[in-house]
Every structure is written in structure tokens, then in C-alpha cells.
Image (spheres, rainbow, N blue to C red):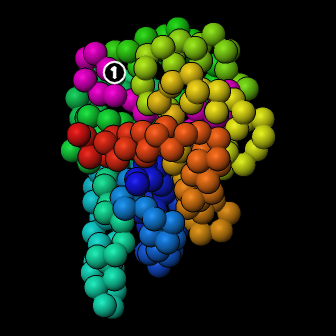
Amino acid sequence: MTDLHTHILPGMDDGARDVTQSVAMLRMEREQGLKAVVLTPHFYSDRESIEHFLLRRKRSFSELTCRLEQLPGEEYKTLPALYLGAEVAWRSELLEKEELPLLCIGQTKNMLVELPFTPWTDGTIKQLYELIVCFGITPVIAHLERYLDRQDPKIIRKLLELDVPIQISCAAFEGFFVRRKVMKLLREGYTCLAASDCHDCTCRPPDMDMALKVIRRKLSENKVSELVCCADELARGN
Ligand SMILES: [Fe+2]
């Protein structure tokens, strides 16, 4: 099982503030049965270049892996496997960046994309289509539940028709109204993946276990396995 959306890398964004907190979050992921975690710090192209972001991410990742290797009793071997990625705040200008594929998850052509909170238009959908066709990149749409009441349902339908994977935050499975909408999407056959979008150990913690309990209660075991496998494949690129 893979957590596809996390802010565990230390000092990168509003997630883990230091490496101690990163390790604590990874332990929580392990206790919940996660075998892999994708590290997806925020990337904002209006604040820094892709090159600068990758350099910061590399430093942060080295700091984390160094600490993990120093854990007693080779504990690091029991922790989830780590993949590098980014939560890319979508801007149309990104389509002009040749280095864009470097923000994909691990060695894959899958990219976690955070769409704007301003109204989406047909142009937004067209840009995502261009991302797929021109770059061969599959956008994984981050936390769709946050947009369900903010965006025109017709545009959301057009997004779903692109048949791209949709990520839903685990916390969304706690609230009755959002959960009902998400479960409807799942039953309609859209690829909706639960991921924690964890930022710390307390306020926005790794909480995959809670979401999976709800999904298991509402859906068949086959459907649950399908969703779990899909998240694994998006991280590994199988
Ligand atoms: Fe996030």
C-alpha cells in the first residue's frame, strides 16, 4: 500500500518542520501498514524555478536518508520505501517548461497536480489534455474533494472525462456529505485514490488506516484491492 501524497520531507514547505518530525511521520505510516510513501512537497513555479526546487528537495532528501540510516537496529529497513515527487501547483506557463517531467513521481510519468481554487474553465481542461498529449504525463489530481462545492459541476465532469486518477484526502472520508460524493465517484468507476496529504503528526497526520476502514465498509474487497494496487502502480510506474 502506498501513500501517494505527503509532506514528510523536512523543511521543504508547511509539512515536516525537521527531520525528527519526518521520522515520526514515517513511523506512523509504517504502523498503518504502508509499504511505500511518495514525498510530494509543494512546488510553486511563481516562487522558484524547477531547478532550484529540485536542488532543495535533493538536500532535504539526503538529510532524511542520512538520519534513517543512523536509526538503531536498522529500523530504516522496516519503514516504507520512499519515492520522490512534488505537488505541482498548476499554472498554464508550466507547459512551456522542458524540465517539467522532472517533477513526476520517481521514475514514472505520473505527476501530482494541485489545480487552482479560482474557477476552472474549458482552458484548464485543455491544458491538462496538453500535458497528457504533449508531455505524455498523467496528472494525478490532488484532493478533488476540496473543489467539489467550489467548481462548476459541468467542468468537474469534463475533468473526470479525461480519465485521469483522482486523489482524495483521507480526512474527506470522515465527513458524511463529502464522503457520499466521493463514494458516488468510486461506484461510477472513476479512479479515486485515498492519500493522507499529511503535514505533521497531530493536526494533519498520516491517516490512511481511517480512510481504508471506511472504504472497506462501503465497497467490496475487490474494489479496495483495485484502489490499493492502483496507488502502488502510480508510484512505481508499472
Ligand atoms: Fe498536499
**Image quarter (top left, top right, bottom left or bottom right) of the C terminus:** top left
Q: Nearer the viewer, residue 76 or 125?
A: 76
Q: What residue would you read off at disc 1? A: 131
Give the residue displayed 43% in from the left and 20% down from the top.
Answer: 163
Tell me the amino acid under the disc marked 1: Leu
Where 100 falls versus 158 (above or below)?
Answer: below
Q: Is mark 1 within 8 Å of ligand 1?
A: no
Residue most toward the bottom?
Answer: 72
Q: Quadrant of residue 179?
A: top right
Where 146 falls versus 126 (above or below)?
Answer: below
**Residue 89, can we see it?**
no
Q: Nearer the viewer, residue 178 or 70?
A: 178
Measuring from the top left, give residue 144's x and y in whole percent: 58, 32
In the rendered structure, the answer to whether residue 57 lies left or right of residue 224 reads: left
**135 in magenta:** yes
**Residue 232, can we see it?**
yes
Magenta stretch bounds: 132-148
**17 in magenta:** no
In the rendered structure, the answer to whether residue 136 lies left or right of residue 168 reads: left
Measuring from the top left, give residue 66's x and y in whole percent: 28, 77
